[in-house]
Amino acid sequence: MDPAQEAQNRETFRQAVTNTLERRLFYIPSFKIYRGVAGLYDYGPPGCAVKSNVLAFWRQHFVLEENMLEVDCPCVTPEVVLKASGHVDKFTDLMVKDEKTGTCYRADHLLKDFCKDKLERDPNLPAEKAAEFRHVLAVLDDLSSEELGAKIKEYGITAPDTKNPLSAPYPFNLMFQTSIGPSGVSPGYMRPETAQGIFVNFKDLYYYNGNKLPFAAAQIGQAFRNEISPRQGLLRVREFTLAEIEHFVDPEDKSHPKFPDVANLEFLMFPREDQVAGRSARRINIGEAVAQGVVNNETLGYFIGRVYLFLTHLGIDKDRLRFRQHLANEMAHYAADCWDAEIECSYGWIECVGIADRSAYDLRAHTDKSGVPLVAHEKFPEPREVEKLVIVPAKKELGLAFKGNQKMVVEALEAMGEKEAMEMKETLESKGEATFNVCTLDKVVTINKNMVSISKEIKKEHQRVFTPSVIEPSFGIGRIIYCLYEHSFNTRPSRDGDEQMNFFSFPPLVAPIKCTVFPLVQNQQYEEIARQIAKSLTVYGISYKIDITGTSIGKRYARTDELGVPFAITVDSATSVTIRERDSKQQIRVNVDEVASVIKEVTDGQSTWGDVLWKYPTHSS
């Protein structure tokens, strides 16, 4: 199939899915009666139920299974916290403006759309040009503001809506700014991620955990990003739900006791070597990937395996799920290794979970800014003799020389690493003075030998003090749910074959409603039995929908199939009922007093539909 036809098919499929989702109120644009706001959506009743089920399973699969410490922190965050984390200075995207209307667009998206459009829709594109566009798409994240602007100019890209010329790209901070309190003197932001709340509470969480490592903290909450030009429905929004885990571990020991539980899993992985060589993702055994150093350590590998199990249990197609390793240019300088769980949908491969070994960066950044040491301790069974670097600044001499800047010079001297300190010692001994760069002053100063004493001493240590490393799986819940909608969407001919019927094949685990209860016909006795069954389902904690309208049973089935309801109970006698399974449309006959427990069994995953099909007599409608 040619690329243009493929693109058209994807668009048609996406339209069918979103039309069904909006019509059945899974989600709708927010503030619709006021023409809506881009990037903001409301979840309707079935959408809320799916989201609630996904989050309940996330808690069970991660928080309960790993005995994590769950916290709930405010969405409004003081500026100083996000200054320390780097968000105030670096949380930006490059933006261009329509020079006449002032409409803003994300620069990399315009370039990406142009290249993809040419590759998909231009059958006469020369091979050389196609290769160039593919290269641009591959290095898009690595282009500087100047390079991005040059490409936009070279390709003659204009504003999509008006075809007006565009400004040069410039950075735009994606955080929503606010002020805390009425005076306006305490600036804050709506948090762009939930992680910082966990990092700043590390000291208390470590104490709560009995001063023991490793441990993990988790948080589910809203995050906010003021996207420049949000599109792609639920995939790129301005307010969204994140579920994040911060697993704190000794940087010298990143093994995991439960790694053997996932070591034999095999799934699609896309290491950076394969990406650079132009190869496709391939099935790799996670145990082998860790052993060969493709994945940096066991703890990171363990979480990659657990994320795979989580997503596939939800109903994500394992053949459209891959774990892609970040390229060197994508990774932050402090990160040891990063992998994204990407799910393929009609928009292409979408990053839904990030799993990163962030080393000790975050805790160190908050330690430096707050002055509170966010560290862990390892007590030794016997004291150890260690050689320690000792730097003693002569504060009086430094005060005379640097006056008001003395404090900054002292701090910079005390912060020197061993190599830099020993080089300075050697220079001072041979020349009597040494040049020294003080970053906080942004200048080079001269230090005399009487201003600082540098030596090494043998000391006895009873414990090791260190900053833990952090391994962070971060889940975009809205993105996972949207991909689940696409992977679960199906059509089949109606009974008489004159139209196509839509249905969602959700696993019972995430289905918004677990079953429906229908009296076959409007009949007081049947309606009373339906109400009794409904009462039993409530006792078992099973969500249901009861429909006692006189509509034909076929239409009622079709209506609930479109909501993804896995089971339908039809009351057609006083003593027994039928249970219909959504995907196969097979039915079994069960006694009235057993029906709620059978539904409980199959929705909880204690039994499969195949198990109950074997156990109970089948029914032909």
Image (cartoon, rainbow, N blue to C red):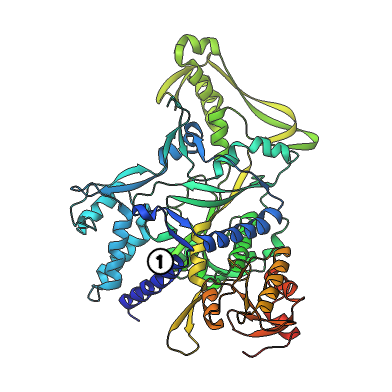
Q: Quadrant of the C terminus?
A: bottom right
Q: Quadrant of the N terminus?
A: bottom left
Tell how many labels: 1
In the rendered image, which quarter is residue 109 located in?
bottom left
Q: Nearer the viewer, residue 137 or 70?
A: 70
Query: Dot 1, crowdedness within 10 Å: few (<14), some or many (≥20)?
Result: some
Mark yes or no: residue 290 visible: no
Mark yes or no: residue 476 visible: yes
The answer to whether 380 is drawn above or below residue 113 in the figure is above
Position in image of residue 533 (x %, y %) = 70, 72
In the rendered image, which quarter is residue 139 located in?
bottom left
* Horizontal relation, residue 170 to residue 364: left or right: left
Q: Nearer the viewer, residue 316 or 250?
A: 316
Say what secondary structure mark 1 lies in: loop
* Horizontal relation, residue 587 to residue 91: left or right: right
The answer to whether 421 is drawn above or below residue 155 in the figure is above
Position in image of residue 122 (x %, y %) = 25, 73
The answer to whether 448 is drawn above or below residue 442 in the figure is above
Q: Nearer the viewer, residue 548 or 122?
A: 548
Position in image of residue 579 (x %, y %) = 66, 80
Q: Nearer the viewer, residue 447 or 67?
A: 67
Farthest residue in the right direction?
381
Give the residue number, with chain letter if any, for mark 1: 347
